[in-house]
Each structure stands twice: as C-alpha cells, then as structure tokens.
Amino acid sequence: MTVVNGSPDFIKQTLKQELRPARRLQLVAKPYSDRWAAFPNAGRRLVMFENTDVANLVSEGFLQSAADDTYVLSSPAPAPKIFVVCTPKSGSSFLVTLLQNITGFGHYNPVFADEQMLEGDPYLPNMEVAAQWPSVSQLHCHAKPKTLALCEQFSIRPIFLTRDIYDSLLSMKEYIDRVPHHELFPNYYELATEDEKRAFIVNVYAPIIVRIVSSWRDAFSEQRVPIYWETYRRFFGDPMSETRAILRHLGLEYTDRQIQDAIERTQNEAGITKLNKGVSGRGRAAFAEHERRQVEALIESFGGFDPSVFEGIPTVSPDNSEPLAANLVEKGRKDRSPRPMADHVTSERPSGSTEVRAQELMQLGGGRGSVYRFDELLTPQESQAPPLIFLHVPKAAGSTLNAIFMKNYKFRADSRGDSFFSRYTPRELVNLANAPRSEDDRTRPGFFTGHINLDNEIFRSMPVRYVAITLLRDPVDRAISHYRFNSTQPSVFQDAIRDGLSVVDYCRKFADAVATQYSIFAPQDGVDAAIRRLEEEISFFGLQSEFSQCVEALGVLLGLPTRTYRNLNATATDAATVTPSEVAELQSLFSEDVKFYTRAVEIYRERMMRLPKPASEHRWARYYS
C-alpha cells in the first residue's frame, strides 16, 4: 500500500504517475470521511489518500461521479514516444538525433536486454517501465502484430525510414571495413577478397532489409496504425520540409527556426549520428550482375513487391498520393488518431513555485544524494554506477564529451534553458536519477546535461549519490572560440559580427552569453569561492586542452567502457579572425577568469599525479550501455 498525503496538485500528479498504465481508476469512500482509496480495475495497486477533499477534485473536473460513492478517473495517456523504425544504414541515427534535438526527449532502447538491436522487437515491460518519460527510439524491427498492438496501446505513430537497398548494402560494407566489428562479424574479417566480402553482405544483410521493408509495407497498406513512410533520398534531399511533415505526423508543433537550429546542431554532432552521406543510387554499380539478381530474387520471394518502395511511398489506394500518413483510419472503425503529443507535454509539465517543487521532491526522496568528491572516486565503495550531472561550459569541448556519455549511459536528460523541471516532473526526475536496479536496468544509470551553473536545482534534487563532471578551457581561447563559432551561425551574434563588431566589443556586448567560467561555479561570489566549490562540489573537472587525458581519467574513475570519440562542434575555417592586439585586450578583460583557470590547472595537474592505474574491470563498468 502506498500512503499519500499532500496538496491537491500533488495528489493529481500521483494519480497520473503512480497508477499508470491502468486504463481506469475508482476512488471509493471509506467509512471515515477523510480517507479515500484508489483501486485500478486490475487490482494490482492500492493507494490511500489522507486529508484529501475529493469534492474539490470533482468540481474541477478531474474526477467524475459514477454511482454512490464511486468516482472514475480515466488514466492519462502515456508520455509521448517516437519510434523511428528503419532498415540498416538508412540515415536513421541522424533522424533520431535530430528529433531528440528538436523535442528534448531522451533516447530510449525498448528492446529486451539480451536481444540484439538488429531485428529486436520493442518489449512491453520495458515500455511500461519508461511510460512516463518522453523518448525517441531507433528500431530495426519487423511490423509484427504485437509491435503494432504496442504502438496502439501507447499511441505511437511510427516513422518508417528506408533507403535504396544497394546503397544500404554498400554503406554497410564500407562501415564495417572502416570501423572493425570483430566481435560481431568475425567471419567477415577472415575473407580474403572483395568478391567474398560483397557476397557476405548480400547473403547476411539483404534478407534482413527485405524482410523489414516487406513487413512494414504490409502494415502501411493495412493502415492499422498511422505510419509515416520516409526515405533516405527524400529526407536528405530536403530535410527542412521532411522534418516539418514528420512533426505534423507526430502532432508536434515547432517553428522553422527551431527546426533549422536543430538540423544545424545535429550536423555538428556527426560523431553521434555517424552520418556518411553518399550519393543516392551509387550502390547498384558496386555489385556484380549475379549479386543484383540474387537481391531481386529475394524481393520476388516476398511477394514481388515493387522495389521502388525503398525510395518511395507504398501504394495504399489509387487516390493516395499524400506523403503524410497522419490521418490513416483503421478499416471499419472511427478515426483512432491520438491526441497530439504537444498537448500531452504541455498538460503534464509541472507548474508552481520552487518551494512547492522542493516539497514534492523531498516527499519523493529527492535531495538525499551527495556528490562524490574526487578522492572518493579513487577508491569507490558503492557497487552500483551512480547518475551523472554534466555541467556543460559553452565552447569547452562539452558536445564531444556529451557524445561519449551518450555511448555509455542509458538515458540522457537535457535541461531546457537552465531548468530540468520544464521537461520533467519531480517524480520523473527522481525516477531517472535513482541508482540502477540491476545491470539490466533499461534507463539507469542516466546522465543530466545542460548549460547550467553550480547553483542549479538539479544538484539539490538527486535522490542518491551522484557524480558531477565539467570541462574548463583557457578563458581567452574560449572567448575567441565563442566569437569565431558564432560568426558562422545565422543569429543576432553573426549579424553583429558581420557589421564589424570586434571580438573585444563582442565579449562586452554579449557578456551574459560568453560569461566567465568562475561565475558558473560561484554565481554570487568571486574567484576564491569558485575554486573552493570547484574542488568540493565537482567530482572531476578536465581541461579542453588535455581532452584525451581527461577521457582516459574518466575511464579510470568511472569505468566508462566506451571512450572513442570524434571532435564535435568545431569552428569552420572561414570564421572571423582575431588580431594579436585583441588577444592582449582579452587577457585584461578576462583577468579574473584567467586567475581562476590558472589555479584550476594547478589542481588538475596535482590530481592527475594521484590518478591510479586502470583496474582490470571497474566495479561500475557492468552497469553502462
């Protein structure tokens, strides 16, 4: 039994979060007037509400009177989920990251823990565990009845992405040639000739691609769930228009400026998205005639569907020429279109004062966690990997480090501006920030990231011990990078720079945007306080100039198993220039920040001298992705 005592708003949030995914709920009066019991019809949960005036909930329309002392509450829709179902090497990583960048939703893999991603099906218990978290998922699954039923249950409107089959096969071969995967394809790397390697790709991957496309073609024709059919050629030919159409299909509304910003950001994250855009149609010529006949025979064996579906939209009816599949109707039934996702996000985002939120967090167990100090990470005692908060200092290699964290942690939660609570309720955040239940936990350990300062609410909200990480950079180099980078990005900054604004005047005019690093760590104090808090409240900080060493140190301290990376968000070579005299002026302008950075470097060097040698296996390593 769960006993709940709190404000009406808190009771409502509990009803919405604690009892999902029950479809209906009854509140039944007890013999004593100040208590009410909530019974989902499945009988799996019992929630007691103390000191709650149910009459107010009825008058507000939150509950409806059914009969006698019984009230009915329709269970809220699950948090929005986006499924990008795709064939291998179809540009899906780019599309998934783009949708994350636009919506701010986290990335979630709903496949069963021991099942490979390729042809892995979404697993209902995993979906139920993550029901309250908005997410984007990348899947290479078939349109099985149970998958389509799951999409109906969670109001998911899948996006299916495919590509010319020969282009996909060639891209897969080039990928595993370039990035060795000996543990997955041991036989491939024993092959001696290009003919043998192409035969391997055709024999192994062509059947997978054809099976996936064939099943989703049938699902698209049956119209059981609304499916948006996307192709590599069409999407990368006009990403702005196609993204607009995809968002309309999902019921999400964003401005063109937001979409364009997200596209540019995603393009700068090529290390995450693995985008290796090639010329459409180049694959066919790479395969021999007998290999192409083999692929065509395979397609014929699956009912002989038109191969043009790899680069176009399957035919549903003679008058269906609209590429948007948002209004598909199941045969013989009324329109099943779910409520637009944007409505759900807006309706369930928390409101109220910081004090009220702090009270809710405390009731839920938030605020109990303390930060790991550097010395504690040298010999960690706890067996479970903790959550991580990344304090992302702008223009200090933070995007690259975020990419490394995404490869290791199971969920990424981004702030919106400087707040995480505009995206997550206190209950959602506490759930995400808890320690993993086991090595197979699908969402934990997670990490929280954003351009925040050390006074941010997130640090006072953690329910368990956590790791806080940041990167610093030489203040003058950082200011110059900020200036030069923004000279290449359409914005008010670029407009000002093109009008002749020097780097020194830029740093004065846009002081809040550039910001000193010490003010991030001591917003109300000076350098001494910033250094003290950096040492005591940040578990580990690295230096942008020593990035590789920092990544290795994180491997030793946290046990991160994946530490490969590509530098992201690099400044273009044609960016605005800075003169030596301007550099000297910046030294004076950022003198306090230079003092802070100089002292931080001394601490960093001393810590590196005490860093132990890598252990054979860190006790936290088994919890990461």
Image (cartoon, rainbow, N blue to C red):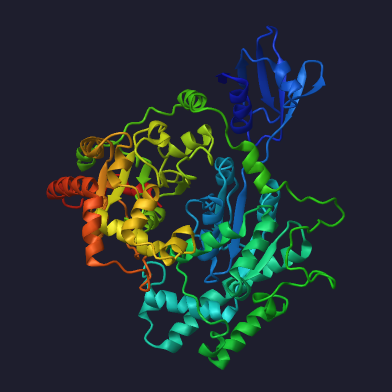
Residue at the (67%, 59%) spot, across then down = 144
* Above or below, 33 relative to 571: above
Towards the viewer: 347 or 366: 347
Give me the residue at 48% from left, 40% from top. 420
- Furthest toward the top, the residue is 32
Q: In which quarter of the view is residue 270 placed?
A: bottom left
Q: Position of residue 516 (x, y in %)?
A: 30, 47
Q: Nearer the viewer, residue 398 or 552?
A: 398
94 on left or right of 326:
left
Residue 397 seen in the current view: no
The percent coordinates of residue 60 (x first, y second) are 73, 24
| Left or right: 484, with 139 as reference point | left
Frontmost residue, 41 versus 80: 80
Q: Is residue 236 visible?
A: yes
**Figure quadrant of residue 258:** bottom right
Is residue 10 found left or right of 369 in the rendered image? right
- Where residue 128 sits: x, y (%)? 59, 42
Residue drawn at 55 percent across, 80 percent down: 167
The percent position of residue 571, horizontal first and vertical second, equals: 36, 66
Extreme-right residue of the structure = 332
Labels in figure, total? 0
- In which quadrant is the N terminus drawn? top right
